[in-house]
Structures are given as C-alpha cells and as structure tokens.
C-alpha cells in the first residue's frame, strides 16, 4: 500500500526534494505561470495559477493529495538553500498501484545543469524501490526537445501505440522496472 506520510524527503548529491509549504507560494506561482516553463503545458482555465490565492490553493491541494496517499509532489531545492527551483511528482497511480505518471518543472536559470536528471533519477529510484512500481509514465509535448531528451537519458522509451486523449500534442514515454 502506498503511503506518503511521513513525507519522503529525497537527497541527492546537489538537491533536496522536500515537501512544498505555504511559504513557497511565490516560487509555486512563478513555476506554474512563467511562460518559458509552461510553454508546452496545457492547463484548464480553473487549474491555471495566476495569483497568490491560486498558488496557495494548489499547495493546499497537493498536500491534501499527499496526506490521502493519492500522489506526491516534491519541491526541488539546491542543498543548503530553502528556495524552490522546481518540482517533480508521482501521480495518476493505476488502480493496482503498479503504474504512476511523473511530471516536473524547473526554473529556466537552473535548466541545462543536469539538476532535473538528478531529481528524476531519485524519484525513479523511490518509485521502483520504495513504492514497488513496475512502470512510470511521462507525458510530454512532441516539441519539448529538452523534456524528451531528459526522459531518454533516464531510460524512458516512447510508447508509439499509446495516445494522450487529453492532448494530441503529447508523446507518452515509459520506463519499466527490470524486475
């Protein structure tokens, strides 16, 4: 059975993946509204983050999902700094809890440094080794070259036969455990 309490902090060589707190609202607002970060993301009008109230609503929602073991979202920070530079999650778990989806975002000034690859590797390890997932999927826009490269570098493969019903511009990638 999947449990996210106590919150599973993850530490890598350069990063701390931690719970997002109410005090992180400014970074969450930036990550979810910056045009560069969100260039390839389609959100419904009601799930867009446009102001402090929206950011606080999102933080409250993700923390409720964590408490109810529906999904987990980590805020990505550089070791020694409390400031969020991105986020990464496992969500959309299958009914049998063997498959999940990952999603991520990263501030442009921290892109191209291998940080998201480091964070993703840690989340994959957590998903396969602690949650006993057998497959993790990622949906990414077919023009998002950086995301596609990140996924391939971390062992994901394109699933040609599967389509995203909610967004025809998305490719679906997956990584399957070696067990």
Image (cartoon, rainbow, N blue to C red):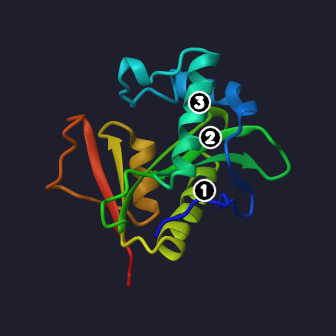
* Residue at 45% across, 61% down: 153
Q: Residue at x 49, y 67 (%)?
A: 127
In the depicted structure, whether residue 124 falls above or below residue 15: below
Task: Mark 2: give few (<14), some (14-19) or many (20+) Cα within 10 Å.
Answer: many
Residue corresponding to mark 1: 119
55 in relation to 87, above or below: above
Q: CA distance from mark 1 to mark 3?
A: 16 Å
State the SS at label 3. helix
From what the image shows, is residue 91 above or below residue 109?
A: below
The reply to whether dot 1 and dot 2 touch (C-beta < 8 Å) is yes
64 relative to 13 in the view: left or right: left
Mark 1 nearby-residue class (10 Å; few <14, some 14–19, many ≥20): many
Say what secondary structure mark 1 lies in.
Answer: helix
**Residue occupying the point 31% across, 67% down:** 96
Asked if the residues shown at circle 2 and circle 3 are in contact, with their CB atoms under 8 angstroms apart, the answer is: yes
| Mark number, residue 31 | 3
Q: Quadrant of residue 100?
A: bottom left
Q: Tell me residue 118's x, y (percent).
A: 61, 59
- Residue lying farthest to the top in this orientation: 51
Marking on residue 61: none
Of mark 2 and mark 3, the one earlier in the sequence is 3
Q: Secondary structure at mark 2?
A: strand
Q: Position of residue 98 (x, y in %)?
A: 35, 68
Residue 86 image label: 2
Q: Residue furthest bottom?
A: 179
In the displayed orientation, state which residue is furthest to the left: 161
Question: Where on the picture, by quarter, is residue 12?
Answer: bottom right
N-terminal of the two: label 1 or label 3? Answer: 3
Rounded to the nearest whole Å, what is the CA distance between mark 1 and mark 2? 10 Å
Q: Quadrant of residue 53?
A: top right
């Amino acid at each position: 059975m999947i449990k996210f309490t106590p919150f599973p902090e993850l530490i890598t060589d350069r990063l701390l993946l931690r719970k997002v707190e109410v005090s992180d609202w400014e970074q969450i607002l930036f990550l979810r509204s910056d045009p560069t970060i969100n260039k390839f993301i389609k959100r419904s009008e009601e799930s867009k983050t446009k102001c402090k109230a929206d950011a606080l609503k999102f933080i409250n929602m993700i923390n409720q999902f964590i408490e109810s073991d529906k999904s987990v979202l980590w805020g990505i920070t550089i070791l020694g700094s409390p400031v969020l530079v991105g986020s990464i999650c496992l969500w959309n778990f299958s009914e049998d809890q063997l498959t999940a989806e990952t999603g991520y975002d990263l501030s442009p000034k921290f892109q191209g440094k291998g940080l998201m690859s480091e964070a993703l590797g840690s989340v994959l390890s957590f998903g396969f080794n602690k949650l006993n997932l057998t497959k993790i999927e990622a949906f990414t826009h077919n023009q998002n070259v950086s995301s596609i490269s990140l996924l391939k570098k971390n062992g994901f493969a394109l699933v040609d036969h599967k389509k995203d019903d909610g967004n025809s511009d998305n490719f679906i990638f997956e990584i399957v455990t070696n067990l």
